Amino acid sequence: MTTEKHPMTIQGYNDLKEELDHLKRVERLNIVKEIEVARGHGDLKENAEYHAAKEKQGMVEARIKYLNAKLAMSEVIDPKTLSGSRVMFGATVTIYDLDTDEEKTYQIVGDEEADIKLNRISYASPIAKALIGKQEGDEAVIHAPKGSRNVEISEVEYK
């Protein structure tokens, strides 16, 4: 078992804690009720509702175990306490794509909180790896599955 800490923003940590709390306080109780109702239908060997509820219970318990471990191994970082022009975990980075003349903004976050729809990328992603350590005005080459892109870092913020 690894003892490596996993960086995560305060928002990501709080989101996982909320999910864990919901699973423990709401979902567990709902599943217990579903199992009780399904048991009332008779023979458990051929009771699809019972087997579905038990399977759901297993998935919820596995997620609870996973979230407990993830939260225990997290290193919470508040981007608001960081500053500077260098890109590091928690930074909100605006890049200008030199090939397509497009500008994009991403926040570099932990694996669990990454969501490309929200422009939140994992620190382990190809984009973040190309940007980390660079500063405003630097150029970087992003090596991605669709090919390489040349970008310039326009702005680095910690918010």
Image (tube, helix red, strand yellow):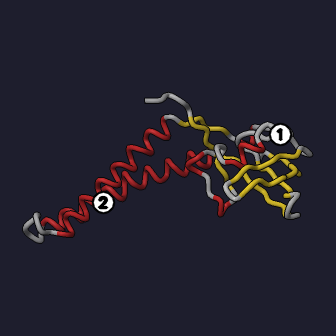
Nearest to the observer: residue 151 or residue 62: 151
- Where the N terminus falls, by quadrant? top left
- In 3D space, how far apart are the residues under numbered discs 1 and 2 (Cα atoms)? 45 Å
- Residue pictured at 80% horizontal, 54% vertical: 149
Nearest to the observer: residue 140 or residue 155: 140
- Which mark, by number, is residue 134? 1
Q: Quadrant of residue 10?
A: top right
- Residue pictured at 85% horizontal, 38% vertical: 84
Query: How would you rate the neighbour count of disc 1 (Cα within 10 Å): few for under 14, some for 14-19, many for 20 or more?
Result: some
Outermost residue to the front: 147
Picture coordinates of residue 8 (x, y %)?
A: 61, 42
- Residue pictured at 88% horizontal, 46% vertical: 139
N-terminal label among 1 and 2: 2
Q: Amino acid at mark 2?
A: Lys
**Residue designated by label 2:** 56
Picture coordinates of residue 108 (x, y %)?
A: 70, 47
Please say if the residues under marks 1 and 2 sit with CB atoms less than 8 Å apart: no
Q: Secondary structure at mark 2?
A: helix
Q: Quadrant of residue 117?
A: bottom right
Drawn side of residue 40 relative to residue 148, left or right? left
Nearest to the observer: residue 159 or residue 148: 148
Outermost residue to the left: 43
Above/below status of 63 relative to 37: above
Outermost residue to the bottom: 41
Q: Judge depth for marks 1 and 2 and give the one in front.
A: 1
Picture coordinates of residue 58 (x, y %)?
A: 29, 53
Q: Secondary structure at mark 1?
A: loop
Query: How would you rate the neighbour count of disc 2 (Cα within 10 Å): few for under 14, some for 14-19, many for 20 or more?
Result: some
Drawn side of residue 93 relative to residue 73, left or right? right
Drawn side of residue 44 relative to residue 122, left or right? left
